Structures are given as structure tokens and as C-alpha cells.
Amino acid sequence: MGSDLVSACIFCAAVLFGGELRPPAGSQAEVGFSYATAARRFRLSDGRDDVSDVTPKFVLIGLGFARPAPAGMGAGTPIAEWRARVAFGPSHDEQSQDPFVVSNTGATGTGRYENFAIVLRYPLGSRDSVEAAWNRRSQKATDLLDVGRERFFLTEQRVLSAERMDVGLGLRHRWQGFEAALSGRLVRPSGADTTAGLSQLSQGSIYGGAFEGRAQLGRWTLSASAERASGRIRVHEENAPAFSPRDTRETATLEAYRLGVGYASRRTEVFFQATYDRSRLPMVDFAVLGTEVAAFESGLHPDSLSRVYLLDLTLRQTLAPGFRVKVLLRSSRGNETVTLTDPTGVQPARSLDIQRSGVFGAGLSHLLGGPEVTLAFGAEIALPIGK
């Protein structure tokens, strides 16, 4: 169970091959639950706040097997491993412009997350492993919109979807107390936004690679990794009143850079990781703001440049042989620049400076504007098979 699989952020990078805490040897089952929040905030010209947030609640189930590398070789990654995890959960969407005026745009709705992760690692001798992984995170939501009317006067319905799928294939080599891995990546970001005045769909494949290095220094583990994928994806847009189709291919880039440090005693293990995540996408299909609803329905096209800083803390405690409990905490915040342009050249270009923030749901998020938070609890249970 990693923070990325139970986080609210769809397009943030995943730890594709694992590598936070050392997986226990043998076969295990794991269960967990999580609460997460993510929000986007824009200050309107009249001083009001336009805020949209998403709060998923996950249940996670996983099965896996790991065989450690020979003693002293590498830095904790198994020489052989398979692991499969699923994380499902309902989510709540909320968007408002406060304080209220009749020209407000508001939205409320529900959705679901369906997240999956698979890791396979096969040994090629005592030092090398070939490794493959697949990770998919998806959110679909249906919102009721109130656009420019009195409170609770619902004017239209919106269907949103956002998805990121990663596939990786790589090779890991081990030295005494150190290991390094290099992999190629295929990433498919996609999203859709459909309202009474808009139909927008973005999808496609981009390609890149990743590098990871880990060192074992006694009870301490140090890690560093970098990944990047870039390319062009298809974008289809239509808007009121004519709904004339526009089809283009736009640039999409997803990248992340991490540093981590861990410490392990006989029963207690701790891992801390800091991540800088940067993305450029030709869509906004996640926690959409009221300002963006009006812009998209008028025919403006978005280009989103997001920069998010994430801090992850993982604690694992062995309570009895074969039984461990786990706590994960993620805190993140950042900023996003959404550039709005008119493909027809009629409307002038605009730029929105958006903050990424949120504290344990919509109410506190509106008041405090604190960091996005993911909090998860889980347990790992050894299974008497595959010894």
C-alpha cells in the first residue's frame, strides 16, 4: 500500500515499482482504508474565492509474494516479487464561489475511484532482475451545476472523468549495499468533461523513462529517482451554440523527481519521501472551477501547467510474527497556471493562477486553504503459502 494508490491526485506520478519500505519475505495479504482530499483555488477579481475539491475514501486490498536478494546485495528491493493491489472508493465533488452572489457558479456531485497496481519482478541471477509494472488510477463523477442563478437552482448536469495509466518495463542491478534501476515508460493520460454547453475529450499515449538508485547504510536507506514522459495527445472539443467540432493534437508532459530516506529497527520502520511533480496537460477534468465552466462553454481551450510538492511519511510496526500495521501520511501543495485560448481567435487569451490546497474536506479547505492530505491505515498479514 503506497500513498499514490490512495491519493486524490489522479495525474501525480505513481511509485510504479514500489520501493518505499522493504516488502516482507514470503506471501502476504494486505488491507487498508484511506481518506484523501485535493482542491484547486482561484481568487476572483472581486476578491471572492472560487474553490473546487474532491474527497475520496478508499478501501484497499492486496496480495503479493517477495523473495529477498542475497544477503548484502542491493538495498532492500526483492530479487523476485509479484504483487497486485486494488483500491476502490466513493468520492464527493464540491465547487463554490464565496461569498454568495447571484452570478455564482456552484456544483456538487458524487463519483468513484477505481485504482489498480501490479508489479512483477523476475531474477536474472543473483544481481539482476527484470521488472514490469502496470498502474491505473481513475475517477468518474457526475455533478449538478448551478450556473448564474439563485442558490439550489440547478441548471445542468456535468459528467467528468480523469485517468492516468502507466506501464513500465525495466532492469535492476545490485551491488554490495547499492542498487540501480532503469525503465521505459508508456503513460496514457485521458479526461472528459461533458455539460449542456460543452463536450471535451482528451486521450493518447506518451513515452519516456525513469531511473532509480538506492543505497543501504546499516539501518538507513537512501533513495533517489526521476521519471519523465512526453508526447502529443488527441483533443476533441465542441461548445454551444453551434457545437462545431475541433480536433487537435496537443503537448502532454508528466514528470516527477524524488528523494527518500528510511530507517529500520527490529520492529519499527520509517520511510520519508519528498517529491516534486510537474505536469503539462491540454485539459482540466479534475476539480473543475466555476470560472473554468464558463470559459470552456464559451469555446476557450485550456493548457494546464501544474507544479506540486508532496511529502510522504510511512510508518510500519511489527506487532507479532507475520502481522504488521502501517500508517501513511501524505501532504502536498502547489500551484497551477491554466492558459485559456480561443482557437477561433475571437476572444483574447487569459491566464488563471490557481493554488492547489485542501484540508480534510471542503469546509476546512474553504477556511484555511491548507495542504492536500492523504491519511491511510493498513495491515500486512503473512500467508502460510509460497515459503
Image (cartoon, grey):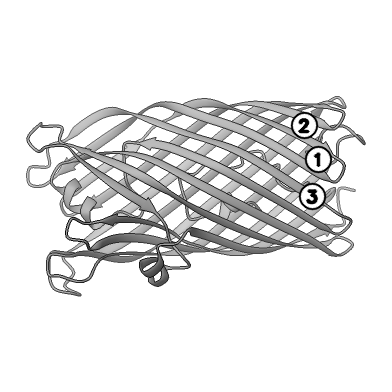
Q: Residue 122, labelled with which disc? A: 2
**Residue receiving disc 1:** 76
**Residue receiving disc 3:** 263
Residue at 11% across / 37% down in the picture? 348
Q: Residue 377, labelled with which disc? A: none
How far apart, in angstroms, are the residues tagged by discs 2 and 3? 27 Å
Mark 3: secondary structure: strand
* Residue 67 coordinates in the image, percent (x, y): 84, 41
Choose between 130 and 217: the one closer to the eye: 217
Dot 1 or dot 2: first in sequence order is 1
Mark 1: secondary structure: loop
How far apart, in angstroms, are the residues tagged by discs 1 and 2? 15 Å
* Residue 313 coordinates in the image, percent (x, y): 65, 55
Identify which amino acid the numbered label 3 is placed on.
Tyr
> In this orientation, does residue 145 appear?
no
Left or right? Give the position of 257 relative to 366. right
* Residue 56 coordinates in the image, percent (x, y): 48, 62
The answer to whether 118 is drawn above or below residue 57 in the figure is above
The answer to whether 102 is drawn above or below residue 347 in the figure is below
Identify which amino acid the numbered label 2 is placed on.
Tyr
How far apart, in angstroms, are the residues tagged by discs 1 and 3? 12 Å
Q: Quadrant of residue 153?
A: bottom left
* Residue 267 coordinates in the image, percent (x, y): 86, 59
Query: Mark 1 against mark 2, which lies toward the viewer?
Result: 1
Identify which amino acid the numbered label 1 is placed on.
Gly
Q: Residues within 10 Å of mark 2 (few under 14, many from 20)?
A: some
Left or right? Give the position of 188 relative to 105. right
Dot 1 or dot 3: first in sequence order is 1
Residue at 36% across / 50% down in the picture? 161
